[in-house]
Structures are given as structure tokens and as C-alpha cells.
Image: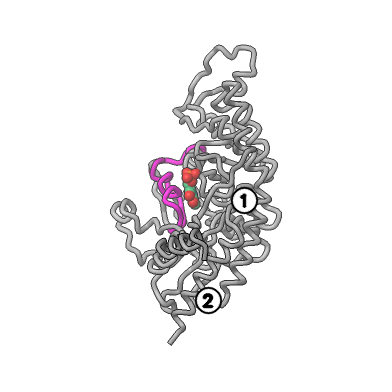
């Protein structure tokens, strides 16, 4: 053996095996096109809401089949804006699912209204429409139906039960989701989307309110911009842009910047490719993980288009070789990131304390809080990454079955 080969062998023996490449739970997929897109607003100096936001809104309207789209700073502010546009406030009740990101309930608190929780269907992770009927009172002023992880809630039944009560779609995770030909965000009085980096398309932070109701859109537009009686785009394109409008109601500044919208336009153009890739890998997971009896993979009801913001399974802890948390530890040890699907809001400190709620009040939400697990699914994963996740889960299953 040549001297330099001997050195190489000795070096290899001394150094531990290389760590496997970490696999993130989610990662934004951005490239040169987004980089190029921010040049124009940067160089023009028009940074806040302007022509790029208008173009992003137009493209979003077109893709989601809605008459109006209003870009915001996040989905949280989009939801808050929708509730404010419906004039919801103290004394009112708003029904929300117990298993969702805390923002869905927080925005109700921020209006001064009371969130009323409803349990979920553990097979879809979405609002249990049957239980919804039992939670409606004469003070119910709105229902927020969440399309969790990209799967639309059962909107036909929810809308039928709601009757005249407005339904807001929390479509934070559901850009590109649909029921038949009806797009997420087009079925209720309003939809609210998120462009946080954990979503399929991102603007860093960002959101969108969608609606088919022109009066609602006008009111939300006014509230988005401090309550100004003349929208910015009208004032700037009118004959006297130098004069300030009147302010008839107290509003917010929930405007998206043109820098973010420039990125959003490019990302939206990639949405269908992202969704196709995600759908293909979701099918792969379903096929390859089918033999693991204690891991329930997500199912898409017939006629629904899942937007696969996340691939969330349920660990049947009675049959599984370990708890959900230990499973997450094991995968993390191999560089594979996971997360709980989301949390049961009625079990979080503020809601527990203020409303005296107990975990057992919403048992399906409680169980999904403890047993749901999102495994990696995003557009920067390679086929090797997906194969590694499957192999790791199968190895855990095989080890459990070994005598
Ligand atoms: C269901 C749901 N609603 C609302 C939000 C809030 O979105 P944002 O971070 O854009 O405010 C999220 C974020 O993860 C979410 O998952």
C-alpha cells in the first residue's frame, strides 16, 4: 500500500462515520427567480403596498377562483381582519376547532369575542361537523373552519349547519386545496391564507384574505389601511394624491410590502408544480408505510384535493412500540426532523386558565395533541431523503416485532 493510501486508511479509521444529512420538517423552495423579482421594487423605491401587491392579489384571485383577494402581513392578521370586517366584538361567540394553531383562537380573543371550541374528526384532523351543531347559540356570530394541513374541512356540512352564520375558512395551510371544483378560500364568506415559510409557498411572513362579497372586501380593505375612507390605490391614481383621506373607523396597518408580493408572484407561479411533487411523495409515503400497523397515515376523502402542507400521521400508542414523543426522539437522533401535527388549543395555558377547560372536554383534539406526528414533506427533499424516512420508520417497526 502506498504511503499516502496508508494515511488515508488511518485517517478514516480515526474519524467517525459522517453524520447523515439532516432532513428538515419543512423548507421553503426559493431560487434565482425570487432573487431577481425583488430587484424591481428595490430599485424603484416602491416598497410598501403598491403595484406588486396588486399583481399578486390578481394572480391569487385567478388561481383560487374568487372575486377579491387582499394581501396582508400574515394569516393571523388576515383572520383578524376578517373578524373585524364582520364587526365581531365583545359579547359575541365564534366557533373554532379545538385542534388548530393557536392563532385561530387568539384572533377571536383579540376582537373581545369568546372562542367556543368544537372537537375534531381524528381521521381528517378537521372540525367535527356533527358536534358543530351542538355548539351554536344565539350569540354565535361566526364559525372558523380550519383546513388543517392542507385538507379542506367538510364545508358542505359546515355551511349547511351554519345557515346564515358566516363561515370563515382558515386556509393557512391550504393554498391550492379544493373540494371538487371549489377552491379553498372561495366557499365561506372569507378565506385566510398564510405564506409563512412552513407553507407550500412563502413570502417570508404574509397572508391573504379572499372573498366573493364586494361589501366585505371594501370593509376589509379599509380596515387593512388604518380605516382610511379612500383606498391607497385609488388615492394614488386619482387627481389629488397629495390630500389625505378621512378616517371613519379605527383600523390597522396589515398591508403586505411590494418586496414580499414580488416573491409571492413567483412562488404562486410554482404552486402547481410544488403541489404535484407533494402529492407524489404523499402517495409514496402512503404506499411505503402501509405495513406499519401502529402508524395511521392521512387519508383524503373522495373528491378532495389535499394541498399537503404537512404529512401528518397518528401514532396508535396502544399498539406502537413506543410513545409518539420517543418516536420523534429516535428519528431526530438520525437527523430526521418531525413535529407534533399541531396542538389542542383548549389545553394551552391561557385557554385552560381563562375558560376552565379540561383535556377531556375535547377528547379527539386531546389525543391528536398527544399522538399526531408530521414527518418531513417539502419540495427540497430528494428521493433519498424520502427513502431514509421510510427506512427509519420501518426499522423501528421491525425492531419492535423482533423477539
Ligand atoms: C391553521 C393555522 N391558522 C393560522 C396560522 C397563522 O399563520 P401565520 O403564521 O401566517 O400568521 C397558522 C400558521 O401555522 C395555521 O397553521
Q: Quadrant of residue 345?
A: bottom left
Q: Residue at (64%, 18%) from the top-left corner? A: 237
User: Residue 392 versus residue 162: which sits nearer the camera?
Assistant: 392
Lower sequence index among marks 1 and 2: 1
Residue 298, numbered label: none
Where 202 sits versus 249, above or below?
below
Label 1 beta carbon less than 8 Å to ligand 1: no
Please report contact status of discs 1 and 2: CB closer than 8 Å, yes or no: no
Residue 99 lies in the magenta stretch = yes
Instruction: Tell me where residue 259 appears, x and y as whole percent.
Output: 56, 31
Instruction: Tell me where residue 194 appears, x and y as whole percent.
Output: 53, 45
Residue 367 visible: no
Q: Which residue is mark 2?
A: 292
Q: Which residue is mark 1?
A: 184
- Over which residues does the magenta segment extend? 84-111
User: Residue 291 versus residue 71: which sits nearer the camera?
Assistant: 291
Residue 169 lies in the magenta stretch = no
Instruction: Tell me where residue 228 appears, x and y as whole percent.
Output: 51, 24
Q: Residue at (63%, 33%) from the top-left corner? A: 36
> Quick one: label 2, few (<14), some, or many (20+) residues within 10 Å?
some
Instruction: Tell me where residue 156 appears, x and y as whole percent.
Output: 62, 58
Amino acid at each position: 500500500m502506498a504511503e499516502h493510501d496508508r494515511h488515508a486508511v488511518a485517517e478514516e479509521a480515526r474519524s467517525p462515520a459522517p453524520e447523515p444529512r439532516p432532513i428538515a420538517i419543512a423548507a421553503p423552495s426559493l431560487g434565482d427567480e425570487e432573487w431577481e423579482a425583488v430587484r424591481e421594487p428595490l430599485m424603484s423605491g416602491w416598497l410598501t403596498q403598491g403595484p406588486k401587491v396588486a399583481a399578486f392579489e390578481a394572480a391569487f384571485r385567478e388561481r383560487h377562483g374568487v372575486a377579491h383577494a387582499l394581501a396582508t402581513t400574515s394569516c393571523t392578521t388576515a383572520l383578524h381582519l376578517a373578524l373585524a370586517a364582520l364587526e365581531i366584538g365583545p359579547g359575541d361567540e365564534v366557533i373554532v376547532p379545538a385542534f388548530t394553531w393557536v392563532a385561530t383562537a387568539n384572533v377571536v380573543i383579540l376582537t373581545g369575542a369568546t372562542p367556543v371550541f368544537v372537537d375534531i374528526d381524528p381521521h381528517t384532523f378537521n372540525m367535527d361537523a356533527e358536534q358543530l351543531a351542538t355548539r351554536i347559540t344565539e350569540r354565535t356570530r361566526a364559525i372558523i373552519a380550519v383546513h388543517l394541513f392542507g385538507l379542506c374541512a367538510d364545508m358542505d356540512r359546515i355551511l349547511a349547519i351554519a345557515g346564515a352564520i358566516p363561515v370563515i375558512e382558515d386556509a393557512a395551510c391550504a393554498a391550492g386545496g379544493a373540494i371538487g371544483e371549489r377552491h379553498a378560500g372561495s366557499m365561506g364568506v372569507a378565506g385566510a391564507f398564510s405564506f409563512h415559510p412552513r407553507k407550500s409557498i412563502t413570502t417570508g411572513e404574509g397572508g391573504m384574505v379572499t372573498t366573493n362579497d364586494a361589501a366585505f372586501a371594501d370593509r376589509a380593505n379599509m380596515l387593512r389601511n388604518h380605516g382610511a375612507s379612500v383606498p391607497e390605490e385609488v388615492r394614488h391614481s386619482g387627481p389629488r394624491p397629495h390630500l389625505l383621506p378621512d378616517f371613519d373607523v379605527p383600523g390597522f396597518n396589515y398591508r403586505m410590502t411590494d418586496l414580499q408580493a414580488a416573491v409571492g408572484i413567483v412562488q404562486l407561479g410554482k404552486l402547481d408544480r410544488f403541489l404535484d411533487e407533494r402529492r407524489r411523495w404523499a402517495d409514496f409515503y402512503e404506499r411505503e408505510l402501509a405495513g406499519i400497523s401502529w402508524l395511521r397515515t392521512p387519508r383524503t376523502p373522495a373528491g378532495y384535493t389535499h394541498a399537503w402542507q404537512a404529512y401528518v400521521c397518528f401514532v396508535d400508542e396502544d399498539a406502537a412500540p413506543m410513545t409518539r414523543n420517543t418516536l420523534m426522539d429516535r428519528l431526530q437522533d438520525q437527523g430526521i426532523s418531525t413535529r407534533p401535527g399541531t396542538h389542542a388549543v383548549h389545553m394551552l395555558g391561557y385557554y385552560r386558565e381563562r375558560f376552565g377547560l379540561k383535556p377531556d372536554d375535547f377528547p379527539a383534539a386531546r389525543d391528536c395533541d398527544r399522538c399526531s406526528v408530521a414527518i418531513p414533506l417539502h419540495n427540497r427533499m430528494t428521493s433519498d431523503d424520502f427513502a431514509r424516512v421510510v427506512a427509519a420508520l420501518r426499522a423501528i417497526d421491525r425492531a419492535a416485532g423482533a423477539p
